[in-house]
Amino acid sequence: MCPTEVKTANAVDIYRDTWVRFLGYANEVGEAFRALVPVSFVWGSYAVATAYVTADAVDKGKTAAVAHGDNPGKTTRVAVAVVDTFVWQALASVIIPGFTINRVCAASLYLLGRTTKWPLPVRKWTTTAIGLSTIPFIITPIDRSVDFLLDSSLRKVYNDGKKHE
């Protein structure tokens, strides 16, 4: 969870606590199916995931705006909330997992081609299954790595060493 989020007790964040969260995984599914579908399907999956990331960032900006009312520094805190959420989500939900699933699928298709005599359609479906089954295992390590990356870089710039409430 990024330090700029403001959460009230029992508040449900539709972008993190509901089925909407799964829209952030659309591009991983698209990458898993890359061997079987037209590339436009894969790019469409990235559009869905990017729309999710953008909507979450806008929502966090609105939440920060409400939380900070007319207090001094409101604009900065809203900007930090939007930028932090967008960068975190872009890295953790789109860029890194998309690349990871793409490479897992490319490697598995290559290795299946080199080590089996399976027909190409069977290799493609197997690659898709491998890609889909990889998704649950990469989520937490990628999320924690992006937390570490941002805590060690961007968040140091706008936090000045302290957490925003």
Image: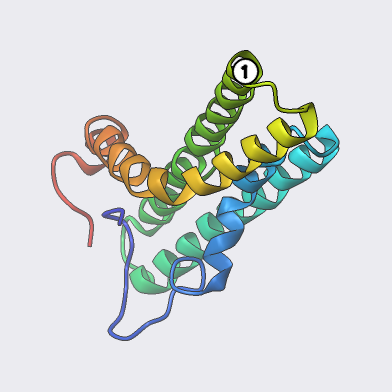
Relative depth, front residue between 119 and 93: 119
What quarter of the picture does the N terminus occupy?
A: bottom left
For the point 24% across and 37% down, the residue is 148
At a point 47% along the width and 60% down the height, the residue shown is 61
State the count of labels: 1
Closer to the camera in the image, 124 or 48: 124
State whether residue 33 is above or below residue 153.
below
Vertical placement of residue 66 versus 64, above or below: below
Q: Position of residue 38 (x, y in %)?
A: 86, 36
User: Is the image coloured rainbow, by chain, by secondary structure, or in one colour?
Assistant: rainbow
Assign the C terminus to one quadrant of the image. Answer: bottom left
Q: Where is residue 2 in the image (x, y as percent from the top left)?
A: 31, 53
Tell me the residue that label 1 is attached to. Answer: 110
Please say whether residue 84 is visible from this viewpoint. Answer: no
Judging depth in this view, the residue of 64 and 105 nearest the camera is 105
Determine whether 131 is above or below 67 in the image: above
* Residue 76, position as x, y percentages in the image: 38, 50
Kind of residue indicated by mark 1: Tyr
Name the residue at the left extreme: 161
> What's the residue at 32%, 73% (across, down)?
7
Residue 90 is left or right of residue 88, and the answer is right
Residue in view at x 34 percent, y 68 percent:
68
Q: Percent position (x, y) of residue 121?
A: 79, 34
2 shown above or below 6:
above
